Image (tube, rainbow, N blue to C red):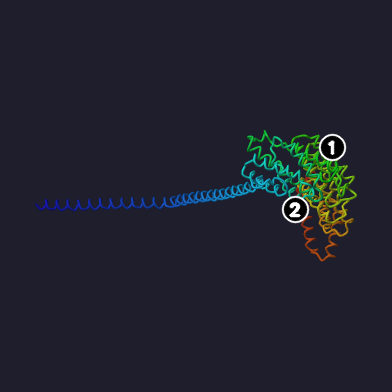
Amino acid sequence: MQSIKTASGSSSHLRKLILTALLTTFLSTQSCNCNAVAAKIESETPQKTNDDRRSQGRERIEQIIKESHERFEKVRENRLLESNMNYAKAFDEYNNLIKSNKNNGAEFIKTAMNLAVAAFRMREYSRANQVYSEAVSAYLALKPDATGEQECRRIIWQHMGYFDPSTFQSRFSELFKSLEQRTTGSMVRDLTNALDNVPSEQNVILRETTGYTRDHNDFDSFQFYKSAIDVRSAVRGANDPSLRQLMEQYARICEQKNNIAEAENVIKRLAGLKGQNAEESSILAQIDLAKFYLRRSMSEKALTAYKTAWSQAKNQLTPNLVSQLIALSSEFKSHGQPDVSDELLANLMNSVTSEDSMRNVDQALRSTVDSCMNSFDLTRAQSLLMKRVNATKRLGNDREGNHWKLKLSEVDLALGQESESNLLFNQVKTSYALTNQDVDKLVSDRQKLIENLNANRSGFSPSESKRPVARTSQKSK
């Protein structure tokens, strides 16, 4: 019995141990699961936050786009409403004049033009052409000395592109001839500028009414400018200076259409136009001709045109001519003729007497010298710099003189011409001392340059010495 009790007690104790162990295991497992869930939630929180932020960002962007579209539509609707109101008002005013048989004179022309402009903006191109044609007819019947004629003339020429494209050329020539005959003085330039509106207005009509494409139905700007030049030449003379703007535009169009012979003839004709300075105009035309030939890879003709321009310009180098010749020098360089570019710069340095003009030359020279140094062409750089230093003597008060002397001194030193280099450096040092500039820094910089050159020379053979020397000299700039 005792043994049974003992066994029963042992069994009970064992069950307690087993239950305790199971409970501990369960709690431990649950704890692990909870930790895993917590860790998972913790790991997912940043990702979820980022997703939320991205979602909110997208929604904000979409909202901004929506609001922008709504504002745009509102503005468009307001403008359309305003255009409709303007169109209706102009139409009523025009009809009132027609009904009262006042379809002539300055008042009718102004009213008809208001309606034509409103109709064009409303894409009523047929109505715009009809009313504009009526305004033109009324204007042509208006006497040159009539009240309001000048104002009517201005508003008529601003929209010559309103003519129907199918009859444009003949209608334009008739109107332009009349405008030319009546326009004098400062208004001629305004009339010329107004012609620039015509191609854009005609192309709008063509695009909207004839299925416009870039390859078909394009406005014939070539014939348009040719007609304008012919009309103006007949009225004002073949060499009138007011032809310049028209002829320059016409020449550009000829070149775009690959009509090279016509473009060349027009540019040559520009040289004969009258003006306040006929000789300068002739030189500018030769410069334009040289640029034209360079664009067309006609290098021999470009060189001839440049020579002609320089022979005429060298004794009257106005600031404008200097600027144009510098630009021509750049054109020669960009088209693979650096020797001609250098020659032109050298000619300018040898001939320019104005310090202001020389500053313009200096800008081009800096670019060229930097290019020489970067390509280690020290001999070419030296040749140009010598001409610039020589120009200092002729200019007198040359504020850039010391800069160019130092630059030439550095190049001389890099090429091993120490005596020439030292002579120039001493001149600059004396100038610095006389003008209370920092001579100590000048001498220190010079010593660093010499040390760098010597260090570079020691690491290269004579045949290779140009490369490191040029690079060091460039750094000492």
Instruction: Please tell me the numbered disc located at residue 301.
Output: 1
Q: Residue at x 74, y 37 (%)?
A: 169
Q: Position of residue 292 (x, y in %)?
A: 80, 40
Residue lying at the far left of the rendered structure: 1
- In the picture, measured across the screen, residue 462 lies left or right of residue 119, that is right
Q: Nearer the viewer, residue 232 or 289?
A: 232
Label 1 neighbour load within 10 Å: few <14, some 14-19, many 20+: some
Q: Position of residue 127 (x, y in %)?
A: 64, 41
- Measure the alpha-carbon separation of dots 1 and 2: 40 Å
Vertical placement of residue 7 versus 334, above or below:
below
Question: Mark 1 or mark 2, which has the lower sequence index?
Answer: 1
Between 329 and 343, the one lying in front of the other is 329
Q: Return the residue nearer the eye: 412 or 96.
A: 96
Question: Could you tell me if the residues under marks 1 and 2 are in contact, i.e. CB atoms within 8 Å?
Answer: no
Q: Is residue 127 left or right of residue 42?
A: right
Quadrant of the image containing the C terminus: bottom right
Of badges 1 and 2, the one in the foreground is 1
Q: Amino acid at mark 2?
A: Lys
Q: Of the numbered discs in the image, which one, if any, rests on residue 44?
A: none
Q: Is residue 274 left or right of residue 27?
A: right
Q: Which residue is mark 2?
A: 475
Q: Residues within 10 Å of mark 2 (few under 14, many from 20)?
A: few
- Write the residue at 77% across / 42% down: 176
Residue most extreme to the bottom: 436
Helix, strand or loop at label 2? It is helix
The answer, for residue 331, to whether it is visible in the render is: yes
Kind of element beneath mark 1: helix
In the image, what residue type sits under mark 1? Lys
Q: Nearer the viewer, residue 140 or 473?
A: 140
